[in-house]
Image (spheres, helix red, strand yellow):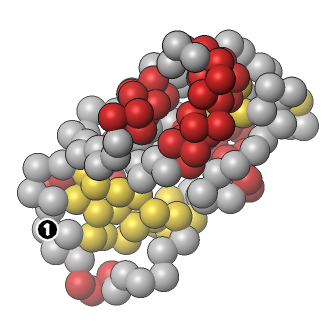
Amino acid sequence: MKKLFQSPVGPLCIEANEESLLSITFNPSDIDPSESKKSNVIDHCIAELDQYFKGTLKTFTVPLLLNGTAFQNKVWSELTKIPYGKTISYSELALRLGDVKCIRAAGTANGKNKLPIIIPCHRVIGKDGQLVGFAGGLDKKEWLLKHEGIIKGAQMKIFG
C-alpha cells in the first residue's frame, strides 16, 4: 500500500504493508493519489510526521520493517539513537559501530536507509560539519536540520 503525503519538505511516498512501514520516498513520481488505499500503518506514520513537522514529536513509534543486511540493520539501529536536534559525524557513527575503519560501509548503509526522517539519517554529517549525502537532496537535509534547530541561519551546531 502506498500513499502520497504533502510535507513541508515536498511530497513523500509512504509505503507500508498490513503491519509495518516499509519506505518513505522523497519526490515520488510513480504514485497516483487516487490509487491510495486505507492503511492504519500509513495513517499512523502520517499522524506522526504531522506532529514532527509541527515540532511536537521527537521520537517515532510507527512499526518498521527493515529489509537489509545484518550490518545495515545495525547501522540503522544506531541512527535511531541520535537524539532529535543533535548530529554525529560519519566517523563517530563508525566508532559507535565498534570499528572506525567501517566508515565507508557505514556511510553506504546510511545511504540505503529506506525510512528517512523516521530513521534519522539526516543527522549524520561530515566530520568538518559539512552536509554530505542525502537521498532526498542536500536542500531537504538542510531543511530538516534547521527544523530540528541544528542549523541556525548559516551556522551549524555540531554534536557528537
Q: Position of residue 22 (x, y in %)?
A: 28, 55
Report the residue at 75% width, 44% height from top. 132
Q: Position of residue 7 (x, y in %)?
A: 50, 59
Task: For label 1, count other residues whose C-alpha is less than 10 Å away and answer few (under 14), some (14-19) or many (20+).
Answer: few
* Left or right of 124 on screen, residue 48: left
Q: Secondary structure at mark 1?
A: loop
Classify the position of the N terminus by image quarter. bottom left
Q: Nearer the viewer, residue 148 or 76?
A: 76
Q: Position of residue 115 (x, y in %)?
A: 41, 48
Report the residue at 65% width, 23% height from top. 101
Report the residue at 39% width, 28% height from top. 74
Quarter of the figure with residue 154 = top right
* Left or right of 139 on screen, residue 110: left
* Left or right of 152 on screen, residue 58: left
Classify the position of the C terminus by image quarter. top right
Compared with residue 115, is residue 51 higher up or lower down, i.e. above or below? above
Compared with residue 15, is residue 147 higher up or lower down, i.e. above or below? above
Quarter of the figure with residue 100 = top right
Q: Is residue 97 visible?
A: yes
Q: Position of residue 19 (x, y in %)?
A: 11, 50
Which residue is label 1 attached to?
Answer: 38
* Left or right of 134 on screen, residue 131: right
Report the residue at 60% width, 28% height from top. 102
User: What amino acid does circle 1 point to?
Assistant: Lys
Residue at the farthest left position: 18
Q: Nearer the viewer, residue 78 or 119?
A: 78
Q: Is residue 86 visible?
A: no
Q: Nearer the viewer, residue 61 or 78?
A: 78
